[in-house]
């Protein structure tokens, strides 16, 4: 099997940068707007799932 470490490191860096950019662009949130809150929670959940996928161990690599 090919050495995928450089590719995984690049994927991890891109994923971290996407999460960082998202957090940097969050403006004050209107806590009384349920739709906005739900949108932010879904976006955060998606980012966390992407981060987990980028950093999970793959036996044999």
Image: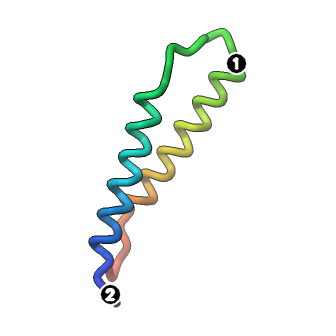
Residue 28 vertical position relative to residue 9 in the rendered view, above or below: above
Q: Please give the residue where the numbered disc 1 appears in the rendered image.
A: 34
Is residue 26 depicted above or below 9 in this figure?
above
Give me the residue at 65% from left, 30% from top: 39
Q: What's the image's color scheme?
A: rainbow
The C terminus, quarter of image? bottom left
Mark 1: give few (<14), some (14-19) or many (20+) Cα within 10 Å: few
Q: Position of residue 31 (x, y in %)?
A: 60, 11
- The answer to the question of whether label 2 and label 1 lie on touching residues, with beta carbons closer than 8 A, is no
Q: Image point 42% across, 41% down: which residue? A: 19
- The image shows residue 28 at horizontal and vertical percentages of 51, 14
For residue 13, the mark is: none
x, y percentage for residue 44?
52, 37
Q: According to the image, label 2 marks what residue?
A: 2
Observer-nearest of 1 and 23: 23
Point out the tag, 2 or 1, that comes first from the N-terminus: 2
Task: Name the residue at 32% across, 87% down.
Answer: 2
Circle 2 packing at 10 Å, graded few (<14), some (14-19), many (20+), is few
**Of helix, strand and loop, which one carries label 2?**
loop
Q: Looking at the image, which residue sits at the far right?
A: 35
Whole-number angstrom distance, CA of label 2 to CA of label 1: 47 Å
Which picture quadrant has residue 4? bottom left
Image point 34% across, 67% down: which residue?
Answer: 8
Relative horizontal placement of residue 52, taking residue 7 as reference (left or right): right
Front: mark 2 or 1: 2
Q: Residue furthest bottom?
A: 1
Disc 1 element: helix
Along the horizontal axis of the image, is 32 left or right of 10? right
Which of the image's four quarters has the N terminus?
Answer: bottom left
Q: Position of residue 29 (x, y in %)?
A: 56, 15
Q: Is residue 6 above or below residue 53?
A: below
């Amino acid at each position: 099997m090919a050495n995928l470490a450089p590719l995984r490191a690049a994927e991890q860096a891109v994923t971290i940068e996407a999460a960082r950019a998202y957090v940097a662009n969050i403006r004050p949130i209107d806590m009384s707007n349920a739709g906005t809150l739900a949108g932010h929670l879904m976006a955060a959940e998606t980012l966390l799932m992407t981060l987990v996928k980028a950093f999970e161990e793959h036996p044999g690599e």
